[in-house]
Image (spheres, rainbow, N blue to C red):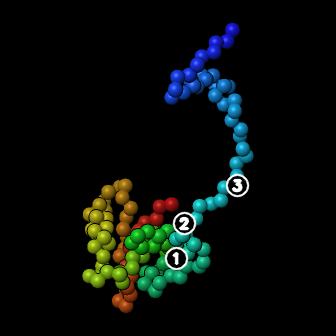
């Protein structure tokens, strides 16, 4: 006993309520091989990383490049004496006419003010060379 129900203009047919009816016409395609998403900045991460003289003088060597942001590049560094890992943020200051960028000054001020807070990364050292256009912020490293 089937009823023939006519549809009013603009009315949509009701969806079935049983799961077997909902997915009766669905065809599952095999998944395509997913390629890793690459960022245009990540291409520079592959080669060897050269450690600047200012960092070498503090007994550290760059291990690898971790990432890049608007204000600088972050590297994983290892202390040659203690073997402790640190993160070094390299800020280029050549694009700023007024010396050190205000964003770097703010970051340093906030990190020094919150030095005792348990959930804030510790700023261990600030390195600025005499003949360089870079500022290095040395942090404790968290994976």
Quadrant of the frame with the N terminus: top right
Q: Where is residue 69 in the image (x, y as percent from the top left)?
A: 43, 68
**Rounded to the nearest whole Å, what is the CA distance between mark 3 and mark 1?**
34 Å
The residue sitting at 54% across, 27% down in the picture is: 12
Label 3 CA crowd tier, 10 Å (few <14, some 14–19, many 20+) = few
Find residue 39 and name its label: 2
Q: Is residue 19 visible?
A: yes
The residue sitting at 63% across, 22% down in the picture is: 18
The answer to whether residue 136 is left or right of residue 102 is: right
Mark with earlier residue (2, 1): 2
The answer to whether residue 115 is left or right of residue 8 is: left
Q: Where is residue 126 in the image (x, y as percent from the top left)?
A: 35, 76
| Element type at mark 3 | loop
Extreme bottom residue here?
131
Extreme top residue here?
1
Of tags 2 and 1, the one toward the viewer is: 2
Q: Can residue 83 be seen in this view?
A: no
Find residue 114 and name its label: none
Q: Position of residue 92 (x, y in %)?
A: 39, 79
| Element type at mark 1 | strand
Q: Above or below — where is 64 with respect to 34?
A: below
**Rounded to the nearest whole Å, what is the CA distance between mark 3 and mark 2?**
19 Å
Residue at which label 3 appears: 33
| Element type at mark 2 | loop
The residue sitting at 60% across, 16% down in the picture is: 5
Residue at which label 1 appears: 62
């Amino acid at each position: 006993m089937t009823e023939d129900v006519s549809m009013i203009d603009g009315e949509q047919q009701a969806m079935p309520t049983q799961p077997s009816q909902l997915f009766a016409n669905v065809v599952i395609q095999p998944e395509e091989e997913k390629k890793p998403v690459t960022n245009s900045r990540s291409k520079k991460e592959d080669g060897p990383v050269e450690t600047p003289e200012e960092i070498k003088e503090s007994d550290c060597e760059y291990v690898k490049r971790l990432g890049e942001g608007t204000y600088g590049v972050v590297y994983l560094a290892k202390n040659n004496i203690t073997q402790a890992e640190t993160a070094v943020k390299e800020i280029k200051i050549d694009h700023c006419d007024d010396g050190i960028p205000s964003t770097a000054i703010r970051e340093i001020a906030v990190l020094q003010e919150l030095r005792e807070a348990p959930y804030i990364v510790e700023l261990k050292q600030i390195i600025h060379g005499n003949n360089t256009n870079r500022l290095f912020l040395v942090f404790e490293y968290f994976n």
